[in-house]
Image (cartoon, rainbow, N blue to C red):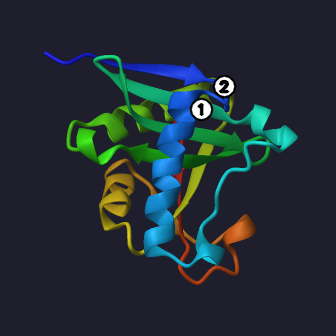
Amino acid sequence: MSTLTLQITEPKNKDLLDLIAKLDDYLYSIYPAEEVFVVDLDEPKVQDIVFVVAYLDGKAAGCGAYRPLDSHSAELKRIFVDPAYRNRRIASRVMTFLEQDAKQAGFTAMLLETGPMQQESIELYKKFGYELIDRFGEYIDCPSSICMRKHLV
């Protein structure tokens, strides 16, 4: 039986960086560069982001993060599972972990941005109770951005 562990990590963790690079490669393959919103790991505010890596039997299989938007809301970011490890509920475990951590940190809403080419992601978010909302923040003028929100209760 496989063992999945989730570990909060620093933004410069090699496993995290490798997973984010794979995610970015994927996003750049399906969207124009100006419609891909990456996390700048060199900006000072990156220390406010909570990053997690999912390890399946000791191997980095997936990642995710959330960043504060204001005192009540956080944004779910960088949810990704390496294709070799998909269909094992890793993304669901990462999301559950991040939502619980954000709730414990005092956030009452989680927002996210995705795109129309990521139907599996959209279905997962809907399954988790996320609802469509108007585009927010840096996504307002991006035609391919789909934004969602969930109240953390």
Q: Secondary structure at mark 1?
A: strand
Quarter-of-image position of residue 138: bottom right
Residue at the outermost left position: 1
- In the rendered structure, find residue 153 and report the number of the disc placed on it: none
Give coordinates of residue 38: x percent, y percent: 64, 57
Query: Which callout, 2 or 1, points at the residue further toward the start of the chain?
Result: 2
- In the rendered structure, find residue 10 and report the number of the disc placed on it: 2
Give coordinates of residue 80: x percent, y percent: 42, 46
Give coordinates of residue 47: x percent, y percent: 78, 32
Front residue of 94/34: it is: 34
Give coordinates of residue 39: x percent, y percent: 68, 50
Is residue 118 placed above or below 24 in the rendered structure?
below
Screen quadrant of the N terminus? top left
Q: Residue at x 53, y 48 (%)?
A: 21
Residue at the outermost right position: 44
Is residue 97 placed above or below 152 in the rendered structure?
above
Q: Residue at x 64, y 79 (%)?
A: 142
Quarter-of-image position of residue 126: bottom left
- In the rendered structure, find residue 51 and report the number of the disc placed on it: 1
| Residue 134 shows in this picture | no
Q: Local crowd at mark 2 within 10 Å, few (<14), some, or many (≥20)?
A: some
Q: Local crowd at mark 1 within 10 Å, few (<14), some, or many (≥20)?
A: many
Front residue of 52/32: it is: 32
Is residue 111 placed above or below 13 in the rendered structure?
below
Q: Using the numbered discs, state the Cα–Cα distance from disc 2 to disc 1 in whole angstroms.
A: 7 Å
Q: Residue at x 51, y 68 (%)?
A: 28
Query: Does residue 79 appear to the left or right of 71 in the view shown?
Result: left
Q: Amino acid at mark 1?
A: Phe
Quick check: marks 2 and 1 in contact, CB under 8 Å? yes
Q: Amino acid at mark 2?
A: Glu
| Residue 9 shows in this picture | yes
